Amino acid sequence: MKVILFGGSGMVGQGVLRECLIDASVESVLSVGRSPLGVQHAKLSEILHKDFFDYSAIEQQLAGHDACFFCLGVSSIGMAEERYRHLTYDITMAAATTLARLNPGMVFTYVTGRGTDSTESGKLMWARVKGKTENDLLKLPFKAAYMFRPPGIQPLHGVRSKTGWVNAIYTVTAPLLSWLVRVAPDHMTTSERMGRAMISVARNGYPKPVLESADINRF
Ligand SMILES: NC(=O)c1ccc[n+]([C@@H]2O[C@H](COP(=O)([O-])OP(=O)(O)OC[C@H]3O[C@@H](n4cnc5c(N)ncnc54)[C@H](OP(=O)(O)O)[C@@H]3O)[C@@H](O)[C@H]2O)c1
């Protein structure tokens, strides 16, 4: 598979990138990001891009791909709905509509979160916005689209958050998180399982378009 990765510098994206680089079924990874990943690998190439609402300047490079792993996302904490919608719905749809037009045979996988609201009308702002984003992604003319709703994610294999105190918490709680992944797979997964699941689903498909924690933890 020729893969395009968005959000490769983030916690989820680092994990997905790692699995892509070690998985023989992934032929190449094209990362689209704002700053260099700092990773050198024969399979990896990068586009440093500024405007995530407009891809017209890089369309040629975005064509000819089999899968997109869209791990770009922001936290809604302290953010007004309009801003969160702009950075979540608008960025994702801008990229996805461009990719669907350029790659009709593409499988698009999107990372949302446990509790995403498909009705788009619940009480939680982030869940409504992610729900609308999922619903509209599923209408695009991709070969297939899959929505991943992870619970908490334990970073493994050197995957790190960009926030120092978050890393400190993950380090201190690592034994507890590993235990939770085993005993409460509805509440915790790992960066490794996320990456494996996204690759496997892009390659082989999955019986349903929305993957909850239990689905992700099967991989
Ligand atoms: N981490 C978890 O435990 C967890 C659990 C469930 C769901 N999720 C979801 O997974 C997704 C990724 O989370 P994460 O933890 O990986 O987040 P993260 O570590 O903060 O990474 C976010 C990624 O998105 C990119 N990004 C953010 N805003 C951008 C913008 N305006 N333009 C271009 N790139 C932008 C960042 O690029 P820069 O490096 O350039 O900032 C980075 O690559 C989010 O939607 C989140 O809700 C995460």
Image (tube, rainbow, N blue to C red):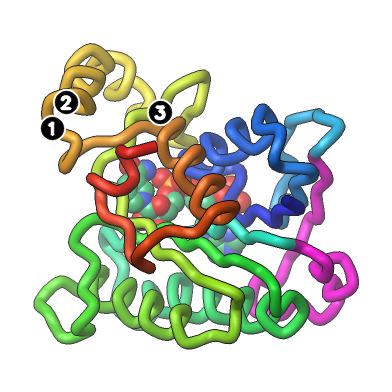
Q: Residue at x 55, y 40 (%)?
A: 16
Give the residue type at disc 3. Pro
Q: Badge 2 is on which residue?
A: 180
Locate the C terminus and report the quarter of the image it occupies. top left
Mark 3 crowd level (few <14, some 14–19, many ≥20, 10 Å Cα): many
Q: Which residues are magenta?
A: 44-65
The tag earlier along the polypeptide, 2 or 3, is 3
- Residue type beneath disc 2: Leu
Circles 2 and 1 in contact, beta carbons < 8 Å: yes
Question: Cβ–Cβ below 8 Å for labels 3 and 1?
Answer: no
Is 54 included in the stretch rendered in magenta? yes
User: CB at mark 3 closer than 8 A to ligand 1?
Assistant: yes
Q: Secondary structure at mark 1?
A: loop
Amino acid type at mark 1: Ala
Disc marking residue 198: none
Q: How many marks?
A: 3
Distance CA(mark 2)–CA(mark 1): 5 Å
Q: Closer to the observer: label 2 or label 3? A: 2
Q: Is residue 104 left or right of residue 160?
A: right
Residue drawn 83% across the image and 75% down it = 59
Residue 184 circle label? 1
Looking at the image, is mark 3 or mark 1 earlier in the sequence?
3
Distance from label 2 to label 3 (Cα)?
A: 13 Å
Q: Residues within 10 Å of mark 2 (few under 14, many from 20)?
A: some
Q: Which residue is the site of mark 3? A: 155
Classed neighbour count for the residue bearing mark 1: other residues with Cα under 10 Å, few (<14), some (14–19), many (≥20): some
Image height of 67 relative to 101, above or below: above
Q: Position of residue 28 (x, y in %)?
A: 79, 45
In which quarter of the view is residue 181 placed? top left
Tags 2 and 3 touching, CB below 8 Å: no
Q: Residue at x 56, y 46 (%)?
A: 199
